[in-house]
Amino acid sequence: MRFFFFHLMPYADLDPDYDKLYPSSWVTLPNSYYDPLKGADLYHRYLDELEYAAELGFEGVGVNEHHQNAYGLMPCPNVFAGALSRRIPDTTKIAVLGRALPVLSNPLSVAEEFAVLDSITRGRLIAGFVRGIGAEYHSLAVNPTESHARFHEAHDLILAAWTKPGPFAWEGRYYHLPHVNLWPRVYQQPHPPIWIPSQGSRETIEYAADPSRKYVYLQTAAPAATLFKTMQSYRDEAERRGYQSSPDQLGWSIKIYVAETDEIARREAKEHVEAFANKFLRMPQEMLLPPGYTSLASMKALINSRKTITGGYRTMEQMIEQGTFICGSPQTVIEQLAEYQRRGGFNIVMAGLHFGTLPHALTKKNIEIFAREVMPALKNAVPGETPRVAAE
Amino acid sequence: MTEGYETITGCRTFVMREGSGPTLLWLHGAGGLRWLPAMARLAQRFEVVAPELPGFGRSDSPDWFESIHDLGYFTLDLIKALDLREVHLVGTSLGGWVAAEAAVRCTAQLASLSLVGPAGLHMKGVVRPDTFLWTDEEATRAMFHDQALADAALAVVPDEAEQERRLKNKYATARLAWSPRWHDPHLHKWLHRIDVPTLLLWGEHDRYLPAVYAEHWASHIPGSKTVVFGECGHAPQVEKPDAFCAELEGFIGRIAR
């Protein structure tokens, strides 16, 4: 099992009573709720946590992109990747998971920024591409009915910019550039590894598993039952397309809290993970699923399955039960991760060891125990094999 | 009333028709095509032709369906394909926008133009709601001044086919109106080309598009007239059907004389 540390950088100082007045912490929550002084402190604290994880031996650290919300304060993930690039060990990878291609006006600037990061890190960049969640289309006023088409064209343009000798002309539907000629070129050849984080749409799984791409598919924000299904879909799709996929093509982004005992872990995590689920993630359906964001058929299915995000209060116990949160002693966490790996067949764990309002001290402790007790025990665990027993 | 399909510019298009007399081409709004009591009344004097626009309801979503301009050209193609002449073109809300986009391009077959609370223009600084963040209930409540009408509309439980049509209509509307939001930034420059008698009809308490837009439209279309219905929301054709039909019949009648 390979471990990355992921941070969402929420505005943890958010007044939890905001939801008495506003339906969501996204799009329309007035930014008077944001205190620039507290925000600056949070940024430094969160970057410290990312750097600390890197020091403790995670294979890499991950950041992502969301716009105009209290849930994640990284509208510009490459700025954070840049801030980390010269502060973390020169063996630690940086995963930007990812840039929301359709909502950005010019994909060539993503190609450029990633090429710069790839150069500065001498090839330790993992490039993530996403469509952004539905709320992004409200926040940036980009037409959701063009989301898929723009994503595909932006991706193709970036890949061409990285791999084809420039200058050349790009004659697309949404992007039309007479001179594509990237300076700098990417450091990794032919290009940085590409990961596709997704909530699990069939279209995305097929896209990532395509033999011409073989991109890492990273399952986000889904119950374990969904995880098992999407991982299997990826393997099936690979087989259908004539190859056997590797567990290293599959990853899971999951919130985890580990402490001295199960009891301590649950006590310490409860308030903060419930804040994540019920305050930061809170979003009405109209915001989460703008028309056209998925195909009509997928939308009908999503409207039903997504009642969990837009519906009633979710408790930590429900999240543990569903497999959207792993919580307990090192032994519990090791056993659960091993079991999920056995059933899911993934090799990459994007561990969200900070969530919601989890304070710095507990985040640090979580990172420490995870790095020192969980990671070594599962280092050699592979799907389909019993993991080594934890050291003491 | 008869209904059927016509293929217009490669698009299988659902069309409702009733009546005889001068042709009244009715373009529906973002909610899709329904045969309204007002249309039934108008069909006593006119041949009412009501297509379901490409992308909406029972009509196809052809590859070329991408922008409001495509629907403007489609409307002209439909007039030609159905051999409609001396057309009294009526459009409500989004359909009014489509009608205006058609009319700035060509009025050769138009006898008049009536726009009912049309989208399509933008007045800087005039606050408008974000209709795409509304729940279905909020959208319905905002439609009417008389909330009893909203209650009645909300009491109707749509069957599965209707639910699917509504979802499809939302997709089509987003495609046309998401960005730029509910307007075409170039339309206002060419409204002076509309050289047929034009009537603007608006609800005084329109919560989708404030009634101040009526004068804005009128100021751009030479010789146009404006009617504002009191105690009325975004859909005078539904909320004030008698007054609405009387105004429309009077307007068209005066042209005919």
Image (tube, coloured by chain):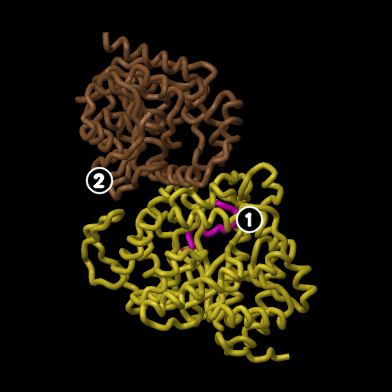
Query: Which chain does the numbered disc 2 sit on?
Result: B
On the image, the x and y values in percent for residue A268 come to 76, 68
Between the residue at mark 1 and the residue at mark 2, the CA separation in whole angstroms equals: 47 Å
- Quadrant of the image for the C terminus of chain B? top left
Of residue A179 and residue A350, the one placed in the foreground of this image is A350
Q: Tell which chain the image draws in brown.
A: B
The residue located at (72%, 83%) in the rendering is A331
Residue projecting furthest to the front: B2
Amino acid type shown at disc 1: Phe
Mark 2 residue element: loop
Of residue A302 and residue A167, the one placed in the foreground of this image is A302
Query: Which chain does the numbered disc 1 sit on?
Result: A
The stretch drawn in magenta includes residue A71: yes
Task: Give above or below for B72 relative to A267.
Answer: above
Q: Any mark on residue A280, and which?
A: 1
Task: Give above or below for B45 relative to B35.
Answer: above
| B244 sits to left or right of B114 | right
On the image, the x and y values in percent for residue A276 come to 66, 60
Residue projecting furthest to the top: B257
On the image, the x and y values in percent for residue B81 come to 22, 35
Residue B97 in sight: no
Mark 1 residue element: helix
Q: Quadrant of residue A363?
A: bottom right
Amino acid type shown at disc 2: Gly
Of residue A370 and residue B183, the one placed in the foreground of this image is B183
- Quadrant of the image for the N terminus of chain B? top left
Of residue A282 and residue B111, the one placed in the foreground of this image is B111
Q: Which residues are magenta?
A: A69-78
The residue located at (45%, 65%) in the rendering is A202
Q: Quadrant of residue A320?
A: bottom right
Q: Tell which chain the image draws in yellow.
A: A
Q: Any mark on residue A168, and which?
A: none
